[in-house]
Amino acid sequence: MQQKWALITGASSGIGSATAVKLAQAGYNLILTGRRKDKLESLANSLKAPEIIVAAFDLQKPQEIDAFCTKNSAYLKKLNVLVNNAGLAKGVEKVDQASLSDWDAMIDTNIRGLLHMTRGVLPHFVAKQEGHIVNLGSVAGRWTYPGGAVYCASKFAVRAFSEGLRMDLLGKNIRVTNIEPGMVNTEFSLVRLGTQSQADAVYQGMTPLSAQDIAETIAWVIDRPAHVNIQEIVIYPTEQAHVGQVHRR
């Protein structure tokens, strides 16, 4: 049986880390990327995948993505699945008060980084007429809210890119999936808000999704038969009916 390979961006924590655990359990070889080398190595040491490659670099820097793709081309030729998980939100200020550096960080990671990583992997998928690209979008890529204009715009871009990419790849036997979670309790709110107390308040009185919930969904999506493409999935916790509409106990 041919061994399968999956590349996961943002694998050092949250959904990326949980996805690595899930795919290792399924027998995948893994390429784990992120900025925090120590966390990537710790994760790799905890897994029992047949083979694991760790690569620490910054998705906000296209030249580092290019260098990674060049250095690891032999492994990328074996790749079956790309999970574009890396992403972030920064700040909740209204547009007229928001930090431009926060905007740049979101655009450079959520859009530009995802685009460059996909473009680096695609030639290998096209050459062998096989592959699966899983993009981590968000419900914010469908519905906007105050204080989230640029983050939402970045995730709208992920949804649009996923649709266009699927069309461009028609006939090449490459699947494209966009996963769109609602509230997931990871480092997301800590990165966005800056303090643990503020992050904890986001999930107070309700049960959010976990990183494991999304990892299980990703594993299910890529395990469908080759003729089945799950184009997109919106996933809310039961106590969240819509963006900004949450039942708290």
Image (cartoon, rainbow, N blue to C red):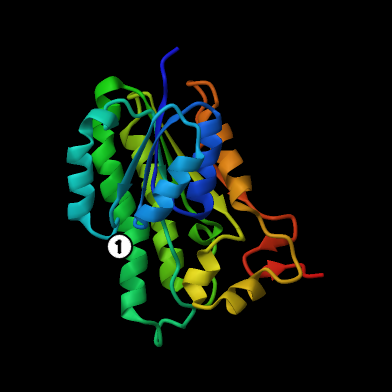
Q: Residue 193 versus residue 227: which sits nearer the camera? A: 193
Q: Position of residue 211 (x, y in %)?
A: 59, 51
Which image quadrant: the N terminus? top left
Q: Is residue 210 left or right of residue 187?
A: right
Q: Position of residue 87 (x, y in %)?
A: 42, 58
Of all residues, the one furthest to the right in this rendering is: 249
Q: Residue 22 versus residue 209: which sits nearer the camera? A: 22
Of all residues, the one furthest to the top in this rendering is: 1
Identified at 50% across, 32% down, the residue is 48
Q: Give SS at disc 1.
A: helix
**Which picture quadrant has residue 199?**
bottom right
- Residue 85 at least partly seen: no
**Which picture quadrant has residue 218?**
top right
Q: Position of residue 242 (x, y in %)?
A: 66, 62
Residue 168 to residue 100: above or below: above
What residue sits right under mark 1 in the picture?
108
Residue 199 to residue 163: above or below: below
Q: Three-letter amino acid code at disc 1?
A: Asp
Of all residues, the one furthest to the bottom in this rendering is: 97
Q: Position of residue 160 (x, y in %)?
A: 40, 50
Q: 10 Å neighbourhood of mark 1: few (<14), some, or many (≥20)?
A: some
Identified at 67% across, 68% down, the residue is 203
Identified at 54% across, 69% down, the residue is 189
Identified at 46% across, 28% down, the residue is 28
- Residue 227 at least partly seen: yes
